[in-house]
Image (tube, rainbow, N blue to C red):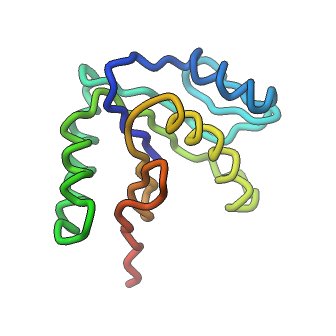
Amino acid sequence: MRFVLTNENKTTFRQIARGLKRIDPKYAFEGEEYFIYDNELYGQVDINRADHSFFHDDISQLKERVLSHSDYPNATRILSILEQATAIFFVNVVWSGSDTEDTLSKFEPLWEWFFANREGILFVDENGFYDNDGILLSIAVEET
């Protein structure tokens, strides 16, 4: 999952952690690498900025996803947002045998914090692009 930021405000792990602790003190980051809830690891995290080597590759891949659905409503809007991107908050979910829905629910306050405090969109792998109001572009998993 990725939150693509478009504002110039430099987002830090400290800012995010403070916001999440206000919601639930069980949230924490271990260093700038792990997303923790109630002392359990739920994800590996990173903030890729425009000067980071992976940033432009990631933006290009996201654009490709949108371009493959360019006839859908909101595709132009999403491409415009991706063009304005200044950073990407990246989460690699750690699946430790717990229920999928329970695991993903631990990230909801994180995305709510981003939508309330930053400008941008959320991309959920094999699902689609979201803004604060909901789904912008659905990207269904193709079955083989």
Name which residue lies at 43% across and 43% down: 2
Dividing the image into 4 quarters, which one contains the C terminus? bottom left
Name which residue lies at 48% across and 48% down: 132
Residue 135 position, x and y percent, is: 44, 61
Identify the image quadrant of residue 83. Answer: top left
User: Quick check: 53 left or right of 36?
Assistant: left
The correct choice, above or below, for 23 with respect to 81 in the image is: above
Query: Which residue is outermost to the bottom?
Result: 144
Identify the image quadrant of residue 22. Answer: top right
The correct choice, above or below, for 114 with respect to 132 in the image is: above
User: Quick check: 15 left or right of 49?
Assistant: right
User: Quick check: 24 left or right of 29?
Assistant: right
Name which residue lies at 65% across and 40% down: 109
Identify the image quadrant of residue 110. Answer: top right
Residue 29 position, x and y percent, is: 65, 24
Residue 95 position, x and y percent, is: 65, 52
Residue 31 position, x and y percent, is: 61, 17
Question: How many circles with numbers are drawn on the protein?
Answer: 0
Q: Nearer the viewer, residue 80 or 1?
A: 80
Q: Nearer the viewer, residue 15 or 124?
A: 15
